[in-house]
Amino acid sequence: MKLAVLGAAVLWGTAGTAGLLVSGVDPVSVAAARLVVGGLVLTAIAAVAGGRSAVRALPRRGLLPAAALGVAAYQLCYFAAISRTGVAVGTVVAIGSGPVFTGLLSWALDRVPPTRRWAGATAAAVAGCAVLTGGGGQVRADGVLLALLGGLLYAFYAVAAARVIGAGASSDAVMGVLFGGAGLVMLPVLLWTGAGWLAEPRGLLAALYLGCATTALAYVLYGRGLRTTPVATAATLALAEPAVAALLGVAVLGERLTPVSAAGLLLLGAGLVAAALPDGVRAGGVRAAGPEPWQ
């Protein structure tokens, strides 16, 4: 089910291009609308899949409300970070630290040490992401700390979802609770930042796409991928998001990749290929001699 995780990352990568439909709107308002719409759709999917009985049957139910707060807090930390230290630095730190925190948190909770292949693939993917995204912007300590907190929050809600799904819960029910709760938290933020742009056709179309495709459908795929894919590997595969965004920028928006950015894209791709290889297969195509629990 690694393909499901990659499918989710592809959808996440289209969010930036779709966001151009509402250029000039407060990005916090756009993010809030995305979570509100996506949360509603995911809650509806969970209701159709199993209704209240599925939610009541969720193991470790107390973990999910905290994780839902983590989803909402991640959005706020990310936008606070980029407002202080710039989009490039904030994005690299938040997205790049997410897989590392996920691996460490999963190791601490599940007592399963990372494999060298996972560590190498993650290092290559994070380095490629940093080179691809660029290092422009003024580096401020408070912005970097907020971006790191965002990466830790992402790791927390990803590991929480994986643990509940691993305990036998429906992935659709888990995502419904997670993002339904986050949508409720972000609704006052949407109203406070202004929702008038949703009355315009372009704004409404963008919010529907961001909520239904890049949130609801993407997290349905991500949740189903977590049924069989270790969460640390899934977090690394999710780094396909900036690669897809960069390729869309070239193909749709007429942007150009510098030689350095192209090298970063290739390095990121190599890390993703290594992470996506079937269990027990090394990059050279030879099966590993022993089990590698995080592949």
Image: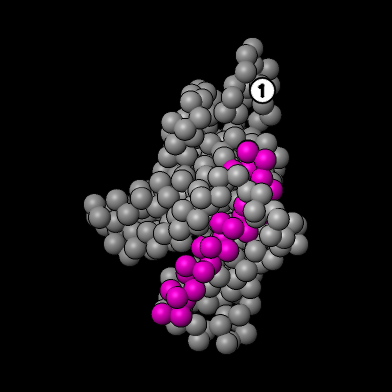
Bounds of the magenta segment: 164-192
Q: Is residue 290 above or below residue 136?
A: above
Tell me if 113 is positioned left or right of 201 in this view.
Answer: left
Q: Is residue 161 above or below residue 281?
A: below
Query: For the residue marked with disc 1, what is the amino acid?
Result: Val
263 or 102, which is in the foreground?
102
44 or 79, which is in the foreground?
44
- Report the residue at 42% width, 50% height from top: 153
37 or 124, which is in the foreground?
37
Quadrant (top left, top right, bottom left, bottom right) of the C terminus: top right
Using a 10 Å C-alpha cutoff, classify the residue at mark 1 as few (fewer than 14 neighbours), some (14 to 19) or many (20 or more): some
Q: Give the SS element for disc 1.
A: loop
Tell me if 193 is positioned left or right of 116 in this view.
Answer: left
Measuring from the top left, give residue 81's x and y in whole percent: 34, 59
Residue 167 within the segment the image draws in magenta: yes
Measuring from the top left, give residue 1's x and y in whole percent: 71, 40
